[in-house]
């Protein structure tokens, strides 16, 4: 008999390694034979679920309140005392399973990942990876503490975002400059963190026998279906196809606003002078509207979302000392997702909730798979789950469909989303190209000032429609505010690849709405049991890097924009 694990994951939140070690020892003492592999995997799954949930809950606690010193202490205790020995124990279990000449059904891809993980594992890297997590928490703390004084009140930088949508251009500029100057003040602190990140990552790669960090990270991310050269091909395709389309989007805006050029504070205001979209005042209204949209889209996704709302798995409002950004994590033992956001009452918040909810639906669907390792999905497809949901939900944004807006405002919201999506691809290419350069030139890029110069070069190449005259210092440090560059290296091209997949899913929905959602859910349910090309195909899309596929997607997006909101003559 295997040692019996607790039923309730919350009961282990204060566990130390000494509490967990007997369960790992019990599994490691067993030699799974072909006829007992399933039982071995069942018990390993339960143990991994509990440890994964412990890590997720402790991380959530430090992001919902970066000033909570007790939560930070608890998380660091986990990183120092539980994470390293647990990873070492996981390595022993991987080696146990790999020694058995049997592959359970649906376990081919997980086993391939496991072999890579076993090859990459170095005990010397465990404490270094724990330190990397701590540096990420420091970054979150810096960003979460950025507040400004606005109209007599201390508010977060994020809470200025609604002002950027106001008609009054002077107020937009004033708010934008106040926020940018406050962020710029942390330039040196983030530069210091950057050097520490780089030193750690280069040491981790060297310890694992790699001459460069990118090669190590590529395998750590299980990128079996494409190469760095494919990414660079994608960058070139974006430069050829999408940058001109993004400039057309920008030119429509510039002409409509009657400006000689677009400044950074001109990018969020409605280009036709309409008041900013105000979809909700309280988070409860955001939840209610999203629930109605999801029920119209498909009863299953509606039920999933209602489960999250009723179980308190949505932390949506922005507040001081909350970490920046938004994310969806999962509690593997409970088989539940959790959404973290910084909502301030604007349309971006609606899009963010739709996006993160797509990740949630993925968690619900893949959690039906029997083994923990089958539920680990490549991020290139995880982001299809989220980005496709933004587009699939678009027809239901109007109040008559249960959403947030009048019919004209709903059309306006879709136009805004498609326009930004077109302009996102070039920005994504800049971020990804920057990361390739950083780790191709580690001796140079450890200096954040060198990074600033190269970032500026890339930004002008891929995002040429913004006028930064007199603001060059702010633009050069824009990379510091892209948290993926600092805290999740090489995690960004996924958004570009997934957006291309998502547009294809959306194109299918225009022909067969219910069938497209059904294929989408079917693909989500496959988890990590098949490769990226197969996952995309199951969702009705093609995993691609080429200009032709991009061109088809951009044509549909531009056509829809013109159909919903014809350009002003």
Image: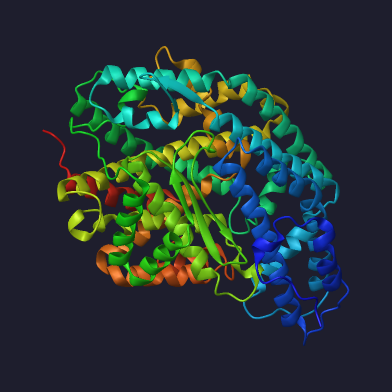
Q: Is residue 38 above or below residue 555?
A: below
Numbered disc total: 0
- Position of 438 with respect to 261 (left or right) is right
Residue 265, horizontal then vertical, whole percent: 34, 24
Rendered-image quadrant of the C terminus: top left
Residue at the image point whose x is 25% and y is 39% from the top: 277
**Residue 102 in which image quadrant:** bottom right
Of all residues, the one furthest to the left in this rendering is 569
- Which residue occupies the foreground of this view, 438 or 528? 528
Residue 125, horizontal then vertical, whole percent: 81, 46
Residue 254, horizontal then vertical, whole percent: 24, 26
Rendered-image quadrant of the N terminus: bottom right
**Residue 10 in which image quadrant:** bottom right
Q: Is residue 353 visible?
A: yes
**Residue 169 in which image quadrant:** top left
Residue at the image point whose x is 48% and y is 62% from the top: 311
Residue at the image point whose x is 77% and y is 87% from the top: 35
Q: Is residue 545 visible?
A: no
Residue 211, horizontal then vertical, whole percent: 78, 41
Of all residues, the one furthest to the bottom in this rendering is 35
- Position of 397 with respect to 326 (left or right) is left
Residue at the image point whose x is 52% and y is 60% from the top: 337
Of all residues, the one furthest to the right in this rendering is 29
In this figure, which colouring scheme has been used for the structure? rainbow
Q: Is residue 540 above or below residue 455?
A: below
- Position of 413 with respect to 464 (left or right) is left
Q: Is residue 346 above or below residue 59?
A: above
């Amino acid at each position: 008999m295997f040692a019996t694990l607790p039923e309730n994951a919350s009961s282990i939140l204060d566990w130390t390694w000494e509490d967990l070690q007997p369960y790992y020892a019990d599994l490691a003492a067993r030699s799974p034979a072909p006829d007992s592999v399933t039982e071995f995997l069942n018990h390993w799954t339960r143990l991994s679920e509990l440890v994964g949930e412990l890590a997720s809950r402790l991380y959530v606690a430090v992001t919902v309140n970066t000033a909570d010193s007790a939560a930070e202490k608890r998380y660091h205790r986990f990183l120092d005392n539980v994470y390293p020995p647990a990873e070492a124990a996981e390595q022993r279990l991987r080696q146990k399973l790999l020694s058995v000449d049997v592959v359970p059904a649906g376990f081919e891809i997980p086993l391939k990942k496991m072999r890579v993980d076993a090859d990459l594992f170095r005990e010397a890297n465990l404490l270094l990876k724990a330190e990397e997590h701590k540096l990420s928490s420091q970054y979150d703390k810096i960003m979460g503490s950025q507040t400004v004084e606005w109209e007599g009140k201390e508010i977060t930088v994020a809470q200025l975002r609604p002002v950027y949508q106001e008609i009054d251009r002077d107020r937009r500029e004033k708010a934008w400059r106040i926020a940018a100057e406050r962020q710029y003040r942390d330039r040196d602190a983030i530069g210091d963190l950057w050097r520490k990140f780089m030193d750690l990552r280069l040491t981790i790669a060297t310890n694992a026998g790699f001459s460069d960090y990118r090669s190590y990270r590529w395998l750590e991310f299980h990128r079996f279906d494409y190469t760095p050269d494919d990414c660079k091909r994608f960058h070139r395709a974006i430069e050829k196809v999408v940058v001109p389309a993004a400039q057309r989007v920008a030119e429509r805006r510039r002409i409509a606003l009657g400006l000689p050029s677009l400044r950074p504070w001109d990018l969020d205001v409605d280009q036709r002078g309409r008041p900013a979209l105000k979809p909700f005042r309280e988070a409860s209204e955001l939840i209610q509207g999203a629930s109605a949209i999801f029920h119209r889209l498909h009863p299953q996704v509606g039920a999933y979302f209602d489960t999250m709302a009723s179980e308190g798995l949505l932390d949506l409002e922005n507040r001081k000392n909350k970490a920046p950004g938004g994310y969806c994590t999962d509690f593997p033992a409970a088989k539940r997702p959790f959404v973290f956001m910084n909502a301030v009452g604007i349309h971006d918040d609606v899009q963010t909730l739709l996006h993160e909810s797509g990740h949630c639906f993925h968690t619900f669907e893949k959690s039906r798979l029997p083994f923990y390792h089958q539920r680990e999905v490549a991020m290139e497809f995880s982001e299809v789950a989220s980005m496709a949901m933004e587009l699939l939900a678009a027809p239901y944004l109007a109040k008559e469909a249960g959403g947030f807006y009048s019919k004209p405002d709903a059309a306006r919201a879709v136009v805004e989303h498609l326009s930004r999506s077109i302009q996102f691809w070039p920005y994504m290419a800049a971020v990804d190209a920057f990361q390739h350069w950083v780790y191709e030139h580690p001796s140079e890029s450890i200096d954040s000032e060198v990074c600033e110069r190269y970032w500026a070069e890339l930004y002008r190449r891929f995002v040429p429609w913004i006028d930064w005259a007199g603001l060059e210092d702010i633009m050069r440090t824009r990379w510091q505010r892209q948290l993926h560059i600092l805290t999740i290296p090489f995690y960004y091209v996924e958004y570009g690849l997934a957006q291309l997949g998502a547009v294809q899913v959306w194109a299918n929905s225009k022909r067969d709405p219910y069938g497209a959602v059904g294929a989408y859910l079917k693909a989500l349910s496959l988890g990590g049991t098949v490769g990226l090309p197969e996952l995309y195909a199951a969702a009705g899309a093609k995993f691609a890097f080429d200009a032709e596929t991009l061109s088809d997607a951009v044509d549909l997006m531009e056509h829809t924009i013109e159909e919903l909101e014809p350009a002003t003559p």
